[in-house]
Image (cartoon, rainbow, N blue to C red):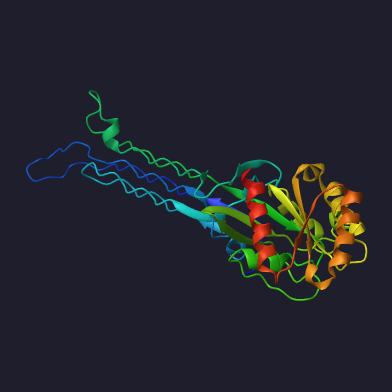
Amino acid sequence: MKFLDQVKIFIKAGDGGSGSPSFRREKFIEFGGPDGGDGGKGGSVILKSERNLNTLIDYRYQQHFKAKRGEDGKGQNKTGRGGGNLILKVPIGTQVFEEDNKTLIFDFKKEHEEYVAAIGGKGGLGNTKFKSSTNRAPRKFTKGTKGEGFWLWLQLKTIADIGIIGQPNAGKSTLLSVITSANPKIANYKFTTLNPNLGVAMYDDKEITLADIPGLIEGAHEGVGLGIKFLKHIERCKILLHMIDVTEEDLVLSYKQIRNELKKYSNDLMKKKEIIVFNKVDLVKKEELKGKINYFEKKIKKKVNILSNTDKKLIFKLKSNLLRYVFK
């Protein structure tokens, strides 16, 4: 499925139905009184969050959405049927903005949240409502009010417990595939991952959500590579898992480059909990690996986890550590 994280849509709630100006017409009753029913309420447009969605692509080709109009009132004091509400499903993490794309209206953070984006019009009054002691046969009735209608921006910012970051081809997608049920595209070239991928890991009946963020390179905060387009998805992750290819020549430089991009984009990203993982440790000798870890931890003053996607013990250990980080 193609990925789309921003879209502009027009929504229109249904108008209310008109009231009825009906009078009783029965045999042997020459002058029946008013019996016009009220109009039905117009349907509202409701946005609802769903966990199984991770893109706004459904709104790319259809951008206008209209709820149904309420039916007009009828004789015999029958109220018109209300127009059905229109439910538009969006991924968790979707933010709703006014037409200026700056004023935030609603932020979907949980599954099955609902936001009434456009309220349906009220039904008009039938002539029965205008009967009085001085007006026994009112012909007056009112039309239904208009339903709300306007343009909105929908922006998707991925929400996950852990965001997997790092340079291209560091092994982020492979990690996601081995510890979750996700099936991201994996290949040995840069920028294989073009969109954020989500996966869920289970351990002892506990669940964590991981997001594989497309690779970042120097200048990402200015749009180099796939950078700034996806940096916003990191903002909503609780913890950052910084994956580094241990076969790189300068691991400290590689680490600092990514951290620098995060800082230039937003200082808030620097405050998030961080897990550092050296990946592909099966490709270096034990003594070389030990030396790289010692040097890195001395320079950065942070503990390093190690991983090989072919070593089940290391995978299990990392998975356990991730759960501990999330739930402690």
User: Residue 185: percent from the left, percent from the top?
Assistant: 68, 73
- Seen at 83% across and 50% down, the residue is 262
Q: Is residue 111 left or right of residue 239?
A: left
| Image label count | 0
The quadrant the C terminus occupies is top right
The quadrant the N terminus occupies is bottom right
Give the quarter of the image for residue 289: bottom right
User: Residue 140: percent from the left, percent from the top?
Assistant: 32, 36
- Seen at 32% across and 49% down, the residue is 81
Q: Is residue 55 visible?
A: no
User: Residue 251: percent from the left, percent from the top?
Assistant: 89, 60
Image height check: is 37 above or below 233?
Answer: above
Of 64 and 287, the residue lying toward us: 287
Give the quarter of the image for residue 241: bottom right
User: Residue 207: percent from the left, percent from the top?
Assistant: 56, 53
Q: Is residue 319 left or right of residue 263?
A: left
Q: Is residue 23 left or right of residue 295?
A: left
